[in-house]
């Protein structure tokens, strides 16, 4: 297949399998301005699949950087009315949401932290209805990625711009199963495989998980009663199957945010709000981060942890074998969408309510009472290594080895 044929398949995959657009449904798509032609491919596929309308929002992170550098703080303390109406309104209409990412991992390095934090808080407050639709699993949504120069050069610094972008495109296509058969069918089989692992874990209903490896992680988290492991595709409240992330290699659930003890050491850098956080560790007591370190990006990590009460607690635990398709590429992507699918990881902040039985039906307060975390943030960070051991402990005290030497043991 040539490049354009792969790109056409990618656009079709995002529509048919990613958001799985339904006849008569509206698609809201965000896409970088430099990928206008790709956005048009997605639009055409969406209309052919039966979309009622496609609403296209252009993104330009370089313009975003200029705005952060020069606009006053008060600009970031609220979301413009037109943007509130757009996201909240289309969510209320049951639209599907597709976000095409092309991110420089360090685009916002050096930006005033109070502006970045103000933006997070404003989004949480002013787009509340939109976010609640996601929490209640009422919508289809999908994230995919395309290269840009800064990202490609960060990954492949010794290559020319064109060579780096070409190599990153090749890597992206491999991660989303394009170029080796029918990607829609391949994703169906992949989703079935992840669902099988979820079923095994759901039957166990572990009350605790312990983590240990040689780089310093020695950690235990409790698991809430009736937690639900998920992986691959998700089915929303209307019964529509979709894949939120492409790629995805994880099986995940919500830990009990009220109990976490010990130390977690990161195994990969974290790109957070355009800043890289490297070689960091988190120490937990009574479910909360009480100490942290970072070789680089300490201020960004501090800003993340201090966003709100829930940002110091865990909202997700995810299992990804070290010997996985993305991990075996031996590429550090500096992008959470990819790196989280090469490594076991946790997330600081908000849980997915539907990973606790009937959690999407509960209020924020009632969800917290059973161990589900609530926060403005949901930020994944990687902990998987080649020697990671994860043990599940059942209510009767029986122990089951879940991961050994970084890979599945069940």
Image (spheres, helix red, strand yellow):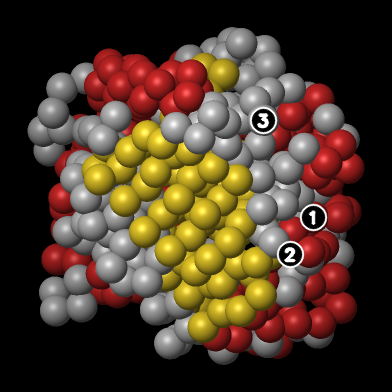
Vertical placement of 84 versus 199: above or below? below
Q: Which residue is mark 1?
A: 124
Circles 1 and 2, Cβ within 8 Å, touching? The answer is: yes
Give percent across and percent down for residue 64. 61, 72
How far apart marks 1 and 2 lie (CA) works out to 6 Å
Mark 2 and mark 3 lie on one chain; the one further toward the N terminus is 2
Identify the secondary structure beneath mark 3: loop
Q: Nearer the viewer, residue 176 or 14?
A: 176
Q: Which residue is mark 3?
A: 225
**Which dot marks residue 120?**
2
Q: Is residue 68 left or right of residue 309?
A: left
Residue 326 shows in this picture: no
Q: Residue furthest front?
A: 397
Give percent across and percent down for residue 74. 87, 78
Circle 1 Cα neighbour tier, 10 Å, few/some/many (<14 / 14–19 / ≥20): some
Circles 3 and 1, Cβ within 8 Å, touching? The answer is: no
Give percent across and percent down for residue 40. 45, 37
For the point 14% across and 79% down, which residue is it?
Answer: 158
Identify the secondary structure beneath mark 1: helix
């Amino acid at each position: 297949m040539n490049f354009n044929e792969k790109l056409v398949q990618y656009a079709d995959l995002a529509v048919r399998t990613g958001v799985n657009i339904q006849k008569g449904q509206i698609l809201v798509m965000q896409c970088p301005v430099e990928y206008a032609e790709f956005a048009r491919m997605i639009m055409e596929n969406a209309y052919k699949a039966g979309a009622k309308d496609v609403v296209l929002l252009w993104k330009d992170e370089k313009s975003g950087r200029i705005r952060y550098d020069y606009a006053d703080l008060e600009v970031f303390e609220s979301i413009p009315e037109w943007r509130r109406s757009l996201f909240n309104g289309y969510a209320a209409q049951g639209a599907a949401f597709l976000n095409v990412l092309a991110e420089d991992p360090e685009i916002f390095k050096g930006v005033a932290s109070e502006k970045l934090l103000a933006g997070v808080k404003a989004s949480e407050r002013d787009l509340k209805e939109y976010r609640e639709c996601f929490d209640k699993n009422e919508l289809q949504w999908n994230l995919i990625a395309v290269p840009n120069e800064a990202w490609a050069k960060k990954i492949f610094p010794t290559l020319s711009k064109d060579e780096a972008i070409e190599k990153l495109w090749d890597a992206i296509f491999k991660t989303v199963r394009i170029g080796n058969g029918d990607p829609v069918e391949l994703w169906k089989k992949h989703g079935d495989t992840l669902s099988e692992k979820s079923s095994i874990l759901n039957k166990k209903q572990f009350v605790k998980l312990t983590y240990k490896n040689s780089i310093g992680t020695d950690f235990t988290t409790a698991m809430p009663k009736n937690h639900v492991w998920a992986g691959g595709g998700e089915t929303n409240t209307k019964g529509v199957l979709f894949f939120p992330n492409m790629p995805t290699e994880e099986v995940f659930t919500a830990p009990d945010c009220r109990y976490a003890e010990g130390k977690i050491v990161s195994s990969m850098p974290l790109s957070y709000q355009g800043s890289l956080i490297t070689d960091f560790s988190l120490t937990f007591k009574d479910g909360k981060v009480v100490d942290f370190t970072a070789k680089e990006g300490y201020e960004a990590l501090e800003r993340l942890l201090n966003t709100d009460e829930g940002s110091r607690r865990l909202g997700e635990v995810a299992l990804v074998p070290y010997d996985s398709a993305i991990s075996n590429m031996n590429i550090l992507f500096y992008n959470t969408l990819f790196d989280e699918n090469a490594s076991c990881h946790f997330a600081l902040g908000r849980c997915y309510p539907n990973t606790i039985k009937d959690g999407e039906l509960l209020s924020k307060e009632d969800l917290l009472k059973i161990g589900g975390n609530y926060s403005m943030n949901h930020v994944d960070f990687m902990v998987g290594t080649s020697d990671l051991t994860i043990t599940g402990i059942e209510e009767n005290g029986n122990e089951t080895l879940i991961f050994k030497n970084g890979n599945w043991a069940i």
